[in-house]
Amino acid sequence: MIPVRRVVATCASGALGVALAACGAKAPGTPTPAPPGPPASASGNAVPSRPPTLAPGPSGLTPVFANGPRTRGRTVALTFDADMTADQGPRAAGGEHFDNPQLINTLRTFKVPATVFMTGRWADQYPAEARAIGRDPLFEVANHSYSHHAFTKDCYGLPTVSEDRMRADVERAYAAFRRAGVPHPMPYFRFPGGCYDQRALRTLSAVGVTAVQWDVVSGDAFATDSDAVARQVLQGVKPGSVVVMHCTRSAAPATERALRTIVPELRKKGYRFVKVSELIGAANRHP
């Protein structure tokens, strides 16, 4: 959890015509292991076995997605980071709340699709909530690492994952999702703190994920003024935007209240809420 997130940009964007902060997922011809995912959702509908991802680029680096097409209708993806570091168990045991069921219920009430970037530690702490989110067709669960430790140095004071542990940290989160009963976690990864470099992109290429950033910072981390959070989002959203928010009560207490303003105001402006997977799919169809 951080107040404002940073991107260390590497690699030129490809020909998708959308904002890609990096290119490439793996070297040509290299098999990519897919993150786990059963073939059916809680509603009984088939879930695609291969969710949309960005195509590999020339350097074998993990691709990074920041927003969808600007000219294909007014769509916006609200994303929520379910942050919990590997060493915050004692704080949770002491009564600190890293979940926010009221926020999830508000999204359901408003019928807003969303993508939740979940740490494996959060899923271990709140398995019933992780399972309920993962089995609700309104949402999709994506990977935010297991530990919420940074994949670069000097990332908002976060502890750092060593290069030889990066891949294992991502895979450990997928294992936590399986334990919790999340049926089809998406092959999308959000770097803790939003911090990455070429080394991290290269190291994760074998996992087969698309890294997902954002183009709108909500400013909700540690914020107490829900009106300020709502204004920042409403002023920043453009067609195809990805908004980064948080669903942790202890560190983002104003987010649920801000949603009660953000959702109706964006709908008044003609915006349709979608999951990240829909934006990535649109980027692939309309380069």
Image (cartoon, rainbow, N blue to C red):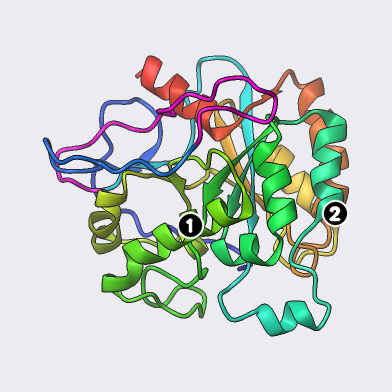
Residue at 56% x, 75% y is 86
Foreground residue, 215 or 133?
133
Is disc 2 surrounded by few (<14), some (14 to 19) or many (20+) residues within 10 Å? many
Residue under numbered circle 2: 226
x then y, percent, for residue 210: 38, 42
SS at mark 2 in the image: helix
Q: Quadrant of the C terminus?
A: top left
SS at mark 1 in the image: helix
x then y, percent, for residue 33: 29, 43
x then y, percent, for residue 139: 66, 36
Residue at 47% x, 72% y is 149
| Picture quadrant where residue 203 is located | bottom left
- Give yes or no for residue 58 being in the magenta stretch: yes
Q: Quadrant of the N terminus?
A: bottom right
Kind of residue at badge 1: Ala
Kind of residue at badge 2: Ser
Residue at 38% x, 32% y is 53
Residue at 58% x, 73% y is 85
Task: Give the Cα separation between the discs numbered 2 and 1.
Answer: 35 Å
Horizontally, is 124 left or right of 28 in the view?
Answer: right
Foreground residue, 269 or 183?
183
- Which numbered tag is attached to residue 211? none
Is disc 1 surrounded by few (<14), some (14 to 19) or many (20+) residues within 10 Å? some
Residue under numbered circle 1: 175
Q: Which residues are magenta?
A: 38-61
Does residue 275 lie above or below 132 as drawn? above
Does residue 106 lie above or below 174 as drawn? above
Foreground residue, 163 or 72?
163
x then y, percent, for residue 24: 23, 41
- Label whose residue precedes the other's in the sequence (2 or 1): 1
The number of numbered badges drawn on the structure is 2
Residue 271 visible = yes
